[in-house]
Image (tube, helix red, strand yellow):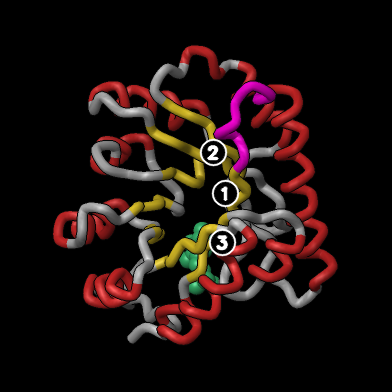
């Protein structure tokens, strides 16, 4: 089941602001994706490699597939032929493997670096020093384009905390842009905000929100 009314109102509010809506379809059937595609949605986000590969094979070829989950280096090869944007790059080994697989597929693959902004042990990502080290060594990456940052805020009712985490991510994006990507116009993507916090994220500079349950309903994970 998809919520078309919610989708329409989100698209209407995001389009004039230049915010890309990524419909996060993990665990949801391909038929839900097709329904939202028929309404006009083109950007979809998935978290699991096998699930993404299966869906990609049977759904329209002009879908922009965003890989938003934690990605293991040994699985990059399965999504490298078609993935549109990899959001959660959190180490140099993974970045090098994406470059290698992009080269094999004769593609340039766009990626975001995951910046750790939350207060939770469970979330992946890099700190400022790790990201700076990684972007200082980016010259060797011929087939990867670093297009910005992605992050997830702490899961809390404390809106001030969430807001300040988003603000921190956006400020770091601007700092990196000035110091490492001044001549890279593609370095402008700020992927933050989900169903519960996208408004705060946009207020703090997000231009890419990843929304699942608002569009597709709550997820039920297999036991
Ligand atoms: C599942 C997921 C989302 C979507 O979450 P909702 O709360 O359902 O909108 C967004 N980003 C990431 C990284 C996710 O794993």
> Cβ of disc 2 within 8 Å of ligand 1?
no
**Which mark is on residue 124?**
1
Crowd tier of the residue under label 3, counting other residues whose Cα lies within 10 Å: few below 14, some 14–19, many 20 or above: many
Pick whichever, 121 or 185, lies toward us.
Answer: 185
Residue shown at 37% from the left, 28% from the top = 108
Pick whichever, 65 or 183, lies toward us.
Answer: 183
User: For the N terminus, which image quadrant?
Assistant: bottom left
What residue is pinned by disc 2? 90
Judged from the image, the secondary structure of the residue bearing numbered disc 1 is loop
Rendered position, 58 above or below 85: below
Judged from the image, the secondary structure of the residue bearing numbered disc 2 is loop
Crowd tier of the residue under label 1, counting other residues whose Cα lies within 10 Å: few below 14, some 14–19, many 20 or above: some
| Residue 91 visible in the current orientation | yes
**Which mark is on residue 8?**
none
Rendered position, 68 above or below 96: below
**Which mark is on residue 209?**
3
* Magenta part of the chain: 181-188
> Distance of mark 1 from mark 3, alpha carbons?
18 Å
Where is residue 87? Give x, y as percent: 49, 46
């Amino acid at each position: 089941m998809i919520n078309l009314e919610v989708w329409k109102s989100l698209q209407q509010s995001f389009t004039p602001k230049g915010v890309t809506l990524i419909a996060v379809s993990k665990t949801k059937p391909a038929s839900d994706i097709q329904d939202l595609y028929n309404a006009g949605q083109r950007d979809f986000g998935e978290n699991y490699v096998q699930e993404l590969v299966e869906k990609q094979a049977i759904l329209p070829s002009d879908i922009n597939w965003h890989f938003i989950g934690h990605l293991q280096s040994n699985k990059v090869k399965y999504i490298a032929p078609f993935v549109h944007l990899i959001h959660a790059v959190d180490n140099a080994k993974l970045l090098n493997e994406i470059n290698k697989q992009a080269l094999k597929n004769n593609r340039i693959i766009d990626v975001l670096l995951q910046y750790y902004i939350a207060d939770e042990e469970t979330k992946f990502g890099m700190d400022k020093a790790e990201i700076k080290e990684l972007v200082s060594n980016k010259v060797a990456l011929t087939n990867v384009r670093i297009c910005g940052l992605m992050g997830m805020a702490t899961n809390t009712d404390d809106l001030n905390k969430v807001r300040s985490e988003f603000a921190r991510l956006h400020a770091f994006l601007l700092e990196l842009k000035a110091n490492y990507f001044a001549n890279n116009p593609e370095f402008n993507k700020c992927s933050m905000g989900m169903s519960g916090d996208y408004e705060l994220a946009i207020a703090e500079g997000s231009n890419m929100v990843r929304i699942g349950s608002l569009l597709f309903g709550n997820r039920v994970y297999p036991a």
